[in-house]
Every structure is written in C-alpha cells, then in structure tokens.
Amino acid sequence: MSLERGIELFNSGRYWESHEAWEEAWMPDRKGPDSGFYKGLIQVAAACLHYGRHNRRGAVNKWQSGAGYLRPYLPRHRGVELAPLVQQVDGYLAAFDGPDWPEGLTMPTIQATPSDP
C-alpha cells in the first residue's frame, strides 16, 4: 500500500483501512526521516475512528498526538497539505474543551499533489 492509497481511503471515510495502508508504507523505514509524518497520519485516522465511535478520550488523545507528530512537517510534506489538516484537528480539540459531546464535526479530507522527493 502507498501514501496515496491511504489518502484515498481516508478521504472516503475508511479510517481503519487508511491507518493500515500508512502503517504498511511506514514500516520499511520506521526510524527514517518520515517516521513522525506517518505516525501523525496514522494517529489522525485513529482519532477520526474514535470520534465516530463516540470515544472522547481516544479521539482527543490521538488528535493531540497526531497533530504533534505532523507539526514539524508543516506546511506540506511529500505532496500532502498538512497545514489545513492540522488546523482542522486543532479545531476539533477546541470543540472538545467543554463537557458536551461535539456533535456534527465534519471529518477532514487530505489534499495532496504528486509526491515530491
């Protein structure tokens, strides 16, 4: 699986499958320079899955860590527009500041251009 396939799956709402695709793409180079990039995407996908299951703790924890992993790669990395994704995640985290469940959050999509080296 590839980075691009993971993005396709994520954008169609198939968060578990995108997580798996990105993990497969990341595994050959787990300690390489893209390690945090893939970890961030994987964690954001997991957070979206947790949100859909109404798991507040899982969604908040994974969005926090996912955004944290992605920040060093802003504004874009490997053709993936990360700045809008991280901005949306920050908005989701703000929505969870109160005691109520934030209904109706629209999950993000990831914009990408052909990969740069």
Image (cartoon, rainbow, N blue to C red):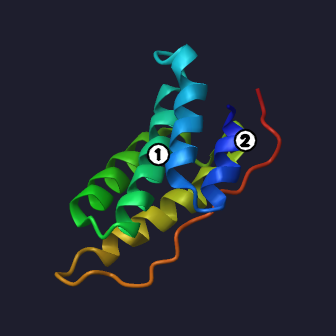
- Drawn side of residue 19 relative to residue 62, left or right: right
Residue sticking out furthest to the right? 114
Residue 55 placed where, x, y %?
Answer: 27, 64
Instruction: Quote the CA–CA distance across marks 1 and 2.
Output: 20 Å
Q: How many marks?
A: 2
Say if 102 sits above or below 90 in the image.
Answer: below
- 85 and 45: which is toward the camera: 45
Q: Which residue is mark 2?
A: 4
Element carrying mark 1:
helix
Q: Quadrant of the N terminus?
A: top right
Q: Which residue is mark 1?
A: 71
- Drawn side of residue 94 relative to residue 72, left or right: left
Say if 113 sits above or below 111 in the image.
Answer: above
Residue sticking out furthest to the left? 99
Residue 31 placed where, x, y %?
Answer: 46, 15
- 5 and 61: which is toward the camera: 5
Q: Quadrant of residue 10?
A: bottom right
Mark 1, Cα crowd under 10 Å, few <14 / some 14-19 / many 20+, is: some
Residue 7 placed where, x, y %?
Answer: 66, 49
Give me the residue at 74% from left, 50% from top: 112
Residue 70 placed where, x, y %?
Answer: 48, 43
Say if 13 sits above or below 76 in the image.
Answer: below
Name which residue type carries label 1: Arg
Element carrying mark 2:
helix
